[in-house]
Amino acid sequence: MMEIKIKLLTGGKMPTKGTIGAAGYDCYAREDITVGTEPVLIGLGFAIEIPPGYHAKIFPRSSTGLKTLLRQPNSCGIIDSDYRGEVKVMYEAKMYVDEKEIVVKKGYHSIKAGERIAQMLIERNEDTTLVPVAELSETKRGTGGFGSTGR
């Protein structure tokens, strides 16, 4: 089993796995913060020493999109093996329509220190080489994208 060094920062909490079969580590907010419609970085209270050849990905927890107004505008944070600063997650609160008042309202979501707000996966980098070519092989799909294969 590979060991990965974690340095806890003031107010930080060690990432944890919720179950034995969990792929990701739950990460916790380091401080209280209110998230509005502009993206904010939220410290997770630790720095990490990822071995060369690996990286970490920071995702919202699976319940975040269902139970909160929070959205991760960059979809996924990538932590490279040579980064030694505090690991953070970026969130914003979506706007919503209040059907009783028929208006669009800005969303806000309060996060408390110690609340699970993200999950971290540690993965191996795949060694690849990008090779410039004049043409690519043809496929049935071709250049169709963004919904071209139907619903």
Image: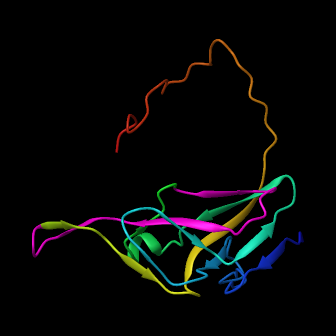
Residue 51 % position (x, y): 87, 60
Residue 127 % position (x, y): 82, 41
Residue 100 % position (x, y): 10, 76
Residue at 47% across / 25% down in the picture? 143
Identify the colour scheme used. Answer: rainbow
Write down the region rendered in magenta: 75-102
Q: Residue furthest left?
A: 101
Q: Nearer the viewer, residue 81 or 1?
A: 81
Residue at 10% across / 68% down in the picture? 102
Please tell me in which quadrant of the rendered image residue 20 appears: bottom right
Count of labels in the image: 0
Is 98 placed left or right of 45 in the picture? left
Q: Nearer the viewer, residue 36 or 58?
A: 36
Q: Work out which quarter of the rendered image holds the N terminus and state it.
A: bottom right
The relative height of residue 95 versus residue 112 in the rendered view (above or below) is above
Residue 22 % position (x, y): 67, 76
Q: Residue furthest top?
A: 134
Is 100 placed left or right of 135 in the picture? left
Q: Residue furthest front?
A: 10
Residue at 73% across / 83% down in the picture? 14
Is 51 placed left or right of 92 in the picture? right
Please tell me in which quadrant of the rendered image residue 85 appears: bottom right
- Is 17 a magenta residue? no
Residue at 71% across / 85% down in the picture? 10
- Is 87 a magenta residue? yes
Please tell me in which quadrant of the rendered image residue 116 appears: bottom right
Q: Nearer the viewer, residue 87 or 124?
A: 87
Q: Work out which quarter of the rendered image holds the C terminus and state it.
A: top left
